[in-house]
Image (cartoon, rainbow, N blue to C red):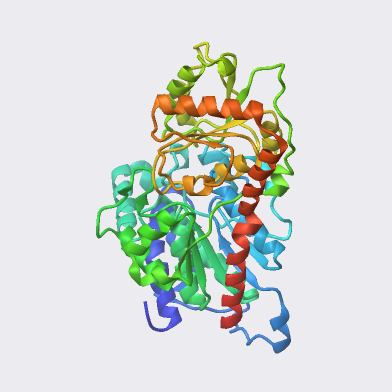
Amino acid sequence: MSGHPNRRAAQYALALDVGVSIERQATGKPTAAQAQHNMGYRSGKLTITAPSGKVPHPMPPGQRERPLRVLYLAYFFPPSRASGVFRARATANHFAQAGWDVSVYTAPREFFETYLGNACDPSLEETVDPRINVTRPPMSYYGWEKDIRQYGKLRRNFPTVSASLYKMFQGKAIPEHYATWIPGVISSAMKAHFRKKFDLIIATGNPFASFVAAQALGRLLKVPYAVDYRDSWTFNQFTETLKFAEGSKAFEWEAKVLRDAAEILYVNDGMRQWHADRYPFASDRMTVVPNGWEPELLGVSEYVPPSENRPLRFGYLGTVTSYLPLEELFDGWRLARSHPLLQDAELDIHGHLGFFPGDATPLMERIPLEEDLGVRYHGAFEKTDGKALYAQTDALVFCVPGARYVTSGKIFEYMASGKPIVSVHQPDIAAAEVLEGYPLWFCGKELTAEDVAQSFIAAAKAARAVDRSQYALAVKHAHSYTRAATLGPWEERMRQLVEETR
């Protein structure tokens, strides 16, 4: 991808517009010609000009005092309730509070409301810093559209041909349905850049179409970019297997993205090491920025011992997914209920059942609500309700998939509550590194019903006996993982990087 910027831009546009054109013809949305027009495509050339048609002048010396400007590509962003949205929201807010001019590019609102069955948390949108400019570039929904009335002529009349062309596009471009978001991002970002120059691009994944867009924009606009792996692109951190066949386009794109990135972030060292082994040429630019928690959302917790006049309340707060070891959790709870401290105890589950409407029924079937076990499902809750739920819970259940590469953002909030934590997961997951040093953590040596039961019993004893000093030590450990503590050093590195390249 070397040579004149216009030729590079044309190559990107051609690679991406092929698939977008297929879908827009099929759905009756803007045609290929219109898409090319929107991208500035003219007879195989993409002319990069300012909106006025004039090449922008160099920045006047006095303008260098302006705030640094960052373009943040975060497909999942409020009002989405996807698990990764909390890191994205916190990142954008932190940069804005540090004095950056922040522009967030995210998915169209209708994607969350319509195509994901209203997978939204309206309260989250209210917590986004008002100084942040949020843009929602348009995209095609070929991979999600189920309403035949929304199909275009090609897809209605020749569904097999349409599907084959779309599959061919994914094979030649980006193997993600989200790839149709990229052209709109590039077009909008280029226009915005010529109005007011970006100094830095940050992309968070998944989806990893954001990484591809960052790489394209970084080379087109000569702006450094960083990529933030909330999850792994080509590696399944839950099953510890590859997501794609060796030699696939995904690996080609990942290598290309990492080769050009100024910095590459991971949420734990296990993920960093896996990628460093796979891509040693980029290992010196790989670093860890763990997740954290937001005091502005949870407030300052207070030491309030459980009432002696009621049974203990254990709580799981978070999305329930098919990956969770629910059988070990509830088998352990059954055994623990034979202990005097837990005979009348309650296990309250708060959160969505899966990320999509079809996930709810099979997950509900795995929760023993019909048994007399004190297990209750309370449904979903808004992020801003979390503080009250933590306050009414005596001990927390940290149930996550067992893998060395899994941390989970929820554990940071759990620690911030200062409550006893029962771990229900494999003992060697990445989250264990975060929990080391937390004085009220209870975890068995193995993920078995017997070990889980012993953890419940130990946590029940701690909940009844915890004093103010133990609580203070627990909260002190949690404060090393506030978002300010985890994001602060990274923001400073990005500021230094930009200052060196301005």
Q: As displayed, is residue 29 above or below residue 441?
A: below
Q: Residue at x 71, y 33 (%)?
A: 388
Q: Is residue 227 left or right of residue 413?
A: left
Residue 351 visible in the shown view:
no
Location of residue 10 in the rendering, given as x and y in whole percent from the top left corner? 41, 73
Q: As displayed, is residue 233 above or below residue 299?
A: below
Q: Residue at x 32, y 49 (%)?
A: 243
Location of residue 186 in the rendering, given as x and y in whole percent from the top left corner? 51, 66
Residue 111 occupies which quadrant of the picture?
Answer: top right
Quadrant holding the C terminus: bottom right
Q: As displayed, is residue 344 above or below residue 14?
A: above
Q: Return the residue nearer the eye: 41 or 236.
A: 236
Location of residue 346 in the rendering, given as x and y in whole percent from the top left corner? 59, 20
Quadrant holding the N terminus: bottom left
Q: As displayed, is residue 200 above or below residue 344?
A: below
Residue 74 visible in the shown view:
yes
Q: Residue at x 34, y 66 (%)?
A: 279
Q: Residue at x 57, y 44 (%)?
A: 438
